[in-house]
Amino acid sequence: MDDKRELRTFKKVVATAGTRVQLSTTVKHVVKLSVKALSTNTNLIYIGDNTVSNLVGYQLSAKEVMELSGVFAKDNFIFDLSEIYIDSAVNGEGVTVSYFE
């Protein structure tokens, strides 16, 4: 098994405020995860599970970062991107996601 981890980055945007969006539509296990609100956001981004909304969720202002860690499994810390959702208070705002796999 190769222990080398590769950094991946992508942007995720909520087209319509109030409509939660999965970070990944397929199961994606990662070792470390960082979610940063875009610098151009004018209002809050909300991060959570499939119940996230502007009433329930971890709030990020523009440029704020949230670091996430997963559960221990098979000698690695694993977090599933398909179980993380974002929502926004304004159309077209989002996050940059960085992770190691």
Image: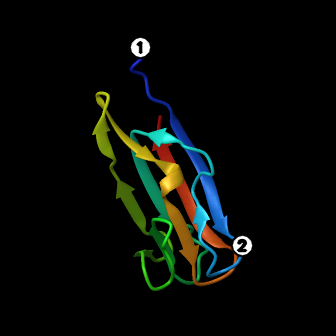
Residue at point 32% right, 28% down?
74
Looking at numbered disc 2 in the image, what kind of residue is underneath it? Ala
The foreground one among 55 and 93 is 55
* Numbered-mark total: 2
User: Looking at the rendered structure, which numbered label has been put on residue 16?
Assistant: none
Residue at point 58% right, 83% down?
42
Residue 47: where, in percent of width, then height?
46, 69
Name the side, left or right, on which 72 lies relative to 61.
left
Looking at numbered disc 1 in the image, what kind of residue is underneath it? Met
In the figure, 32 relative to 37: above or below? Answer: above
Q: CA distance from mark 2 to mark 1?
A: 40 Å
Residue 93: where, in percent of width, then height?
63, 73
The foreground one among 63 and 16 is 16
Judged from the image, the secondary structure of the residue bearing numbered disc 2 is: loop
Please give the residue where the numbered disc 2 appears in the rendered image. Answer: 15
In the figure, 95 relative to 55: above or below? Answer: above
In the figure, 18 relative to 26: above or below? Answer: below
Judged from the image, the secondary structure of the residue bearing numbered disc 1 is: loop
Please give the residue where the numbered disc 1 appears in the rendered image. Answer: 1
In the figure, 52 relative to 74: above or below? Answer: below
